[in-house]
Image (spheres, grey):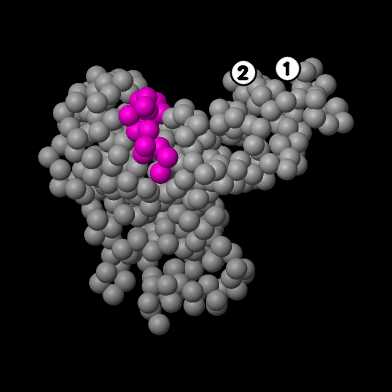
Amino acid sequence: FKKVGNHIIVLGCLRSFNEQNIANIAWSYATMGESHPKLFRKVANHITAQHNLDPFKPQALSNLAWSYATMGESHPKLFKKVANHITAQHNLDSFKPQDFSNTLWAYATIGESNPKLFKKIADAAVTKKNEFSSQQISNTLWAYATNGHIDEHLYQSLAPTAAEIVDKFNNQGASNVAWAYAVSNVPAPTLFGQNFIDCCMEKQDEFTQEQLSQLHQWSLWQQELNSNISLSSTLQEKCFEAFISQVFHPSALQDDVISHLSSIGLQPVEEKLLQTGYRLDAFMEVNGNKIGIEVDGPFHFLGRKPTGNTILKRRQITNLEGIQVVSVPYWEWDKLKRDSNEKQKYLRSLLCLN
């Protein structure tokens, strides 16, 4: 693989490769887990230089996106060009569910937000809802939730299909779907019934710590809905323990914010563990109100839009703990630079202490 990749990157151009060749090259390296950043950069530059992507078939486009995301090869111009091509299509009739799920998974995995693309695919996916496999449903809904792009019609449309094949979900698929619906806050009683509970019970020894954490958040969602559906007490406890065992490392940004909260006379409790299992960066009482401070760094957002994890945490803490969650976005704090007076002023305004 290294020798082939090295040969390709020294070629003056890739015009002798057709579109399927290009897609197959990227797919092969990604499938085998063979890293070759210079090759991926060469291929991406070749594609973005094309006048249009009309010669690429849907499968080739989805495989390209999947390959770059799988290898962690971020190339914003490539992802933008692919998205622009897809959204410009009159319809997506030639796309299969696998093309949809691979494309969406890729954009969510690599951290590319493109609302127009997600909307276009959602509308098309609804018309093919009965053609989706369990894995395709899982990857699709996970992608929308991860990017914080909630399309209620899509979630409602895929729920009956998912319910019919609930026994086909593997452990990752079951936890991803549960977590995705928790993020979306779109009730799906046809899906989350006894069959889903049985599915989880059968797989309880297969779930990873991350998957158990997802199921804990799904259980919290059931509390939000006042649902009578719940996992067994044993599995619930297992999920809770996995959720609170996640390791957190306070950032310099977080330390700075907490230091300035103290400097204005407040007494923030750092890394406050709540009954739900969530942790707040800082917790305090202000004028008799319970306030949670979340110091949100870059990984909490796609651009300036909160990710699904961020949305879910804020909502569940507010609904289940009765705590007002106040966010300190990194870009707002960064622009204050080292001016302590401005930072104190910012926090006073944010907490209505003026």
Cα distance, mark 2 to mark 1?
9 Å
Mark 1 surroundings within 10 Å by alpha-carbon count, few (fewer than 14), some (14 through 19), many (20 or more): few
Q: Is residue 69 above or below residue 259?
A: above
Please name the residue shown 60% across and 43% down the image. Answer: 85
- Decide which of 217, 6 is in the foreground and name it: 6
Mark yes or no: residue 112 visible: no
Residue drawn at the location 85% of the way across and 27% of the way down? 11
Q: What residue type is labelled 2?
A: Met
On the question of residue 330 being in view, the answer is: yes
Q: Residue shown at 36%/39% (left/top)?
A: 126
Where does the magenta region start and end? 123-138
* Tag shown at residue 237: none
- Residue 112 or 281: which is nearer the viewer? 112
**Image location (x, y in percent) of residue 125:** 40, 37
* Residue behind mark 2: 32
Q: Which percent across, then down, holds residue 192?
A: 21, 34
> Which is more toward the observer, 16 or 54?
54
Tag 1 secondary structure: loop
Within the image, what quadrant is residue 142 found in? top left
Residue 324 counted in the magenta span: no
Q: How many labels does the image show?
A: 2
Q: Where is the C terminus found, in terms of image quarters?
A: bottom left
| Badge 2 vs badge 1, beta-carbon distance below 8 Å | yes
The reply to whether the magenta stretch includes residue 128 is yes
Q: Earlier in the sequence, mark 2 or mark 1?
A: 1
Secondary structure under tag 2 reads helix
The residue where tag 1 is placed is 1
The residue lying at 37 percent from left, 77 percent from top is: 352
Query: In which image quadrant can residue 7 be found?
Result: top right
Viewport quadrant of the N terminus: top right
